[in-house]
């Protein structure tokens, strides 16, 4: 299990505490989706130590249609990954009109472009800052939503297949 999930829980706890008096975000919730997430002691320990047990839900695996509903209804999608091969989840969230807070490392800056809030995934307080900025800065939030939809639309399976074919042809000497 990546080390980033306990950090995400800690950052959520910091943001939740700092937003405790906010009329819209006083009861902020964190939903963690994924088969293995709840099974790791470090994640459970982070939830207990930060005292956010009542605000964190572990859902495990969810079918794609259900996942799409979570993307569409989420206030923000926070993905402070330390390593990504490509970064499909942030693009899925962007396509659903959800502002994204993600890592400024690995492949993610290239994948999300200027359509996401980039944070240092090793720094709990920077992740919390990103969460708060996306929630509280309405202009930034609306800009990320609009840019995210456009950016995600620039990716397609057809375009990806055509690019892969072009590369194979180039490497193989065909043109």
Image (cartoon, rainbow, N blue to C red):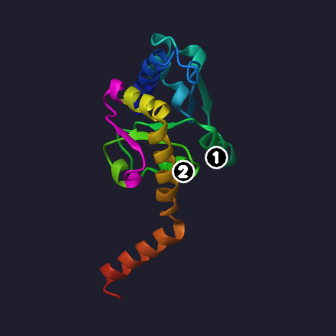
What residue appears at the point 67 percent right and 43 percent down from the top-left corner?
Answer: 69
- The residue to which callout 2 is attached is 92
For the question of whether residue 3 can be seen, the reply is no
Q: Which mark is residue 68?
A: 1
Q: Decide: is 35 above or below 171.
A: above
Q: CA distance from mark 2 to mark 1?
A: 8 Å
- State which tag comes first along the sequence, 2 or 1: 1
Image spot of residue 119 (x, y percent): 34, 36
What residue appears at the point 30 percent right and 86 percent down from the top-left corner?
Answer: 173
Question: 29 or 129, which lies in front?
Answer: 129
Outermost residue, front side? 139
Outermost residue, bottom side? 175
Question: 152 or 21, which lies in front?
Answer: 21
Q: Quadrant of the C terminus?
A: bottom left
Q: Decide: is 42 above or below 137.
A: above
Point out the stretch of residues depicted in magenta: 111-126
């Amino acid at each position: 299990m990546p080390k980033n999930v306990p950090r995400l829980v800690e950052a959520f706890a910091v943001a939740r505490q700092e937003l405790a008096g906010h009329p819209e975000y006083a009861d902020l919730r964190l939903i963690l989706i994924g088969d293995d997430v709840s099974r790791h002691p470090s994640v459970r320990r982070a939830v207990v130590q930060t005292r956010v047990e009542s605000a964190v839900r572990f859902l495990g695996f969810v079918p794609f249609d259900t996942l799409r509903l979570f993307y569409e209804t989420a206030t923000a999608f926070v993905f402070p990954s330390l390593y990504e091969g490509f970064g499909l989840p942030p693009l899925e969230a962007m396509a659903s009109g959800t502002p994204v807070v993600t890592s400024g490392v690995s492949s993610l800056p290239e994948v999300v472009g200027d359509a996401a809030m980039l944070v240092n995934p090793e720094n709990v307080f920077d992740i919390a800052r990103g969460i708060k900025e996306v929630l509280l800065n309405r202009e930034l939030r609306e800009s990320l939503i609009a840019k995210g939809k456009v950016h995600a639309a620039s990716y397609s399976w057809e375009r990806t297949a055509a690019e892969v074919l072009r590369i194979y042809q180039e490497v193989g000497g065909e043109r």
